[in-house]
Image (cartoon, grey):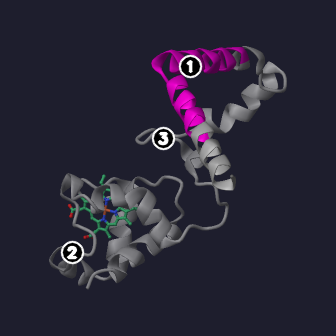
Amino acid sequence: MKSTKRLMSAAALSTFALSTSALSTSAFKAYALCALLGLTLSASAEVVPPGSADEIRERLEPFGALCRAGSDCGQTAAPVSSGPQSGEDVYNQFCFACHATGASNAPLFADSEAWQPRIAKGMEVLVGSTLNGLGLMPPRGACMSCSDDELGAAVQFMVDQVP
Ligand code: HEC
């Protein structure tokens, strides 16, 4: 008796599975999509960011004020942190653009052949070239918001990576 009952419930289960799979026809999918779309539409119509227009503008301000590469953004281009940047940070933000790619024929990062003759000139000369610019390298390696110390640290970082 028991085993027949189990058999019957198994049959019921498979019918159930069948009917649900039948539901997932394209018609059902289209219906679900419509329902979803309706939800999204009504949601986007109702959700308004909190605050007045001025408050919203103020919140978005930091993004609108982003500095584009190549424009003179002065101090506003300074990164988020207020403390001095490490040489590695400065390198990764500014110097990397040329020295990692060889753009403008810049001596490649950690390229011993390119750097040994320059290192031989001494740190003072290298930092001086960076501050004043040299050949196709713009003054301050294009980091107008960097302090002399930060640029010196960047040169030190680059020199330290030369094998
Ligand atoms: C626009 C590309 C560019 C950027 C950005 C740049 N450099 Fe250069 N850099 C060069 C080029 C090109 C040279 C080779 C100049 C030459 O010898 O004529 C160079 C050379 C140097 C030298 C060797 C100077 C010497 O006296 O031989 C140092 C040091 C240096 N760069 C450091 C930096 C640092 C630090 C930064 C970032 C703060 C930086 N560079 C950013 C292009 C760039």
- Residue 134 shows in this picture: no
Mark 3 residue element? loop
What residue is disc 1 on?
33
Above or below: residue 125 compared with residue 2: below
Q: Nearer the viewer, residue 16 or 153?
A: 16
Q: CA distance from mark 2 to mark 3?
A: 30 Å
Q: Earlier in the sequence, mark 1 or mark 2?
A: 1
The residue carrying pointer 2 sits among few (fewer than 14), some (14 to 19) or many (20 or more) residues within 10 Å by Cα, namely: some
What residue is disc 2 on?
111
Query: In the drawing, what numbered circle is on residue 72?
Result: 3
Q: Nearer the viewer, residue 28 or 142?
A: 28
For image coordinates 39% across by 73% down, the residue present is: 155
- Hey, which quadrant is residue 53 in on the image? top right
Q: Earlier in the sequence, mark 2 or mark 3?
A: 3
Q: Position of residue 126 (x, y in %)?
A: 33, 73
- Hey, which quadrant is residue 163 in on the image? bottom left
Q: Which residues are magenta?
A: 13-42
Mark 2 residue element? loop
Residue 123 among magenta residues: no
- Hey, which quadrant is residue 46 in on the image? top right
- Asked whether the beta carbons under mark 2 and mark 3 sit within 8 Å of each other, the answer is no
Q: Position of residue 43 (x, y in %)?
A: 72, 20
- Asked whether the beta carbons under mark 1 and mark 2 sit within 8 Å of each other, the answer is no
